[in-house]
Image: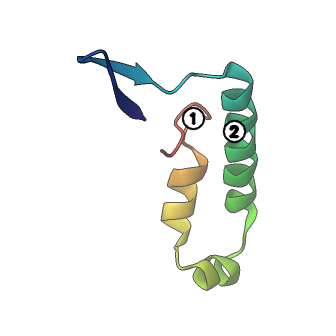
């Protein structure tokens, strides 16, 4: 997230701070979700609207490849 602020007529940009612990918790949660997705049977995958190939592709993504 990019925030633009004005300070005495000068524009500054400030990025949202990065918290490594928040990132690690999120990466671990995503890894767990991807692992579970890979264990679902075809009937359950159809229920959520994806096929086996998409589930396999998603499960093989590295843990650091997080959705935005």
Q: 8 left or right of 16?
A: left
> Which numbered dot is residue 26?
2
Q: Mark 2 falls on what kind of element? A: helix
In the displayed structure, 32 sits above or below 12; it is below
In the displayed structure, 47 sits above or below 66; it is below
* Residue at mark 1 to residue at mark 2: CA–CA distance: 13 Å
Q: Which residue is mark 1?
A: 62
Q: Nearer the viewer, residue 47 or 9?
A: 9
Q: Nearer the viewer, residue 63 or 53?
A: 63
Residue 38 image offset from top left, x and y in percent: 68, 58
Q: Mark 1 falls on what kind of element? A: loop
Q: Nearer the viewer, residue 42 or 6?
A: 6
- Looking at the image, is mark 1 or mark 2 earlier in the sequence? 2
The answer to which image quadrant residue 39 occupies is bottom right
Which quadrant: the N terminus? top left
Residue 54 image offset from top left, x and y in percent: 49, 62
The residue depicted at 56 percent of the width and 61 percent of the height is: 55
């Amino acid at each position: 997230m990019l925030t633009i602020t004005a300070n005495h007529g000068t524009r500054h940009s400030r990025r949202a701070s990065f918290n490594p612990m928040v990132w690690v918790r999120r990466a671990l949660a995503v890894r767990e979700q991807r692992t579970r997705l890979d264990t679902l049977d075809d009937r359950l995958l159809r229920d959520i609207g994806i096929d086996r190939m998409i589930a396999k592709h998603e499960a093989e993504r590295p843990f650091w490849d997080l959705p935005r």
